[in-house]
């Protein structure tokens, strides 16, 4: 694939002060969730990206019908829309999300797959009007995925709002450009629970940061923005 530019990636998250991201049991005020959305809007991003597990509540539940005959479906990207104002992007290598709609709150859905998914699933996505791009044969290449999102959909700014493993994968691949962190007024204290970046066991792919700004927000949140040094 010809090398193209990729989107500017901003990791936008609400961790505890000790970096945990599972909010169950935190009892955050409603103002904290409103602040997360309001600060996200400041970036005027073209889309947001998360993993399969995080996307399941948005995708809903449907049934993937069996195809009756027909030619094999080629493993080429399927672009249902290029003119959406915003995109909701799911990393779903095995094709497990059963979409009920091709949009989430007017944001067009793009799902990122490997070529190992079934023809039944590809036919299902096409019938639903869900765009899909392939990120590799059996494993996703995140640089390749980002290049396609920029080239095919014109996505220039992308919010990364995933779980620890997804965020960690972007960090390890040096694909995070900026961090937008709303520190929740919680000391979690959990051991073994997901953190902001879970790239690998032991020593991780440390990245040096430059502080851009710090601001107190409603709900006792502290909003810190960092640029990744390169």
Image: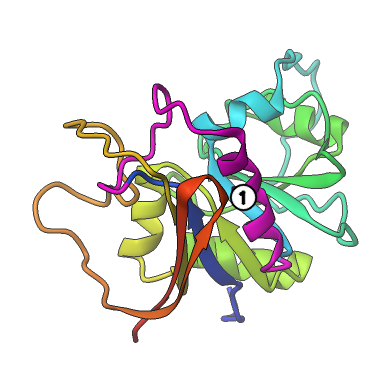
Residue located beneath label 1 in the image: 35
For residue 96, side relative to residue 174 (left or right):
right
Count of picture labels: 1
Q: Is residue 162 above or below residue 3?
A: above
What residue is drawn where x is 30% and y is 37%? 194
What residue is drawn where x is 77% and y is 18%? 67
* Residues shaded magenta: 17-44
- In the rendered image, the residue lying farthest to the bottom is 230
Q: Nearer the viewer, residue 146 or 53?
A: 53
Give residue 20's position: percent from left, percent from top: 31, 41
Give residue 34's position: percent from left, percent from top: 65, 44
What residue is drawn where x is 57% and y is 65%? 146
Residue 114 visible in the displayed image = no
Quarter containing the C terminus: bottom left
What residue is drawn where x is 68% and y is 23%? 98
For residue 165, side relative to residue 220 (left or right):
left
Residue 36 part of the magenta-drawn span: yes
Q: Nearer the viewer, residue 130 or 156?
A: 156
Q: Nearer the viewer, residue 70 or 128?
A: 128
Residue 190 part of the magenta-drawn span: no
Give residue 123's position: percent from left, percent from top: 78, 30
Give residue 100's position: percent from left, percent from top: 79, 23
For residue 31, side relative to residue 184 (left or right):
right
Q: Tag 1's secondary structure?
A: helix
């Amino acid at each position: 694939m010809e090398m193209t530019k990729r989107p500017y990636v901003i990791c936008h998250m609400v961790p505890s002060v000790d970096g945990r991201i599972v909010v169950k049991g935190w009892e955050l005020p409603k103002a904290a969730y409103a602040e997360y959305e309001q600060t996200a809007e400041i970036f005027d991003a073209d889309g947001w990206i998360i993993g399969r597990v995080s996307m399941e509540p948005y995708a809903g539940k449907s049934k993937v019908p069996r195809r009756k005959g027909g030619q094999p479906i080629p493993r080429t990207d399927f672009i249902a829309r290029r003119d959406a104002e915003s995109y909701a992007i799911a990393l779903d290598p095995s094709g497990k999300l059963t979409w009920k709609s091709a949009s989430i709150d007017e944001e067009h859905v793009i799902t990122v797959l490997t070529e190992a998914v079934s023809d039944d699933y590809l036919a299902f996505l096409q019938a639903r009007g869900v765009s899909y791009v392939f990120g590799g044969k059996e494993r996703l290449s995140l640089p390749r995925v980002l290049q396609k999102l920029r080239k095919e959909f014109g996505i220039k700014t992308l919010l990364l709002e995933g779980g620890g493993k997804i965020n960690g994968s972007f960090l390890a691949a040096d694909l995070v450009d900026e961090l937008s962190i709303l520190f929740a007024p919680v000391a979690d204290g959990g051991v073994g629970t997901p953190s902001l970046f879970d790239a690998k066991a032991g020593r991780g792919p440390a990245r040096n940061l430059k502080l851009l700004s710090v601001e107190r927000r409603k709900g006792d949140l502290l909003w810190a923005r960092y640029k990744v040094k390169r």
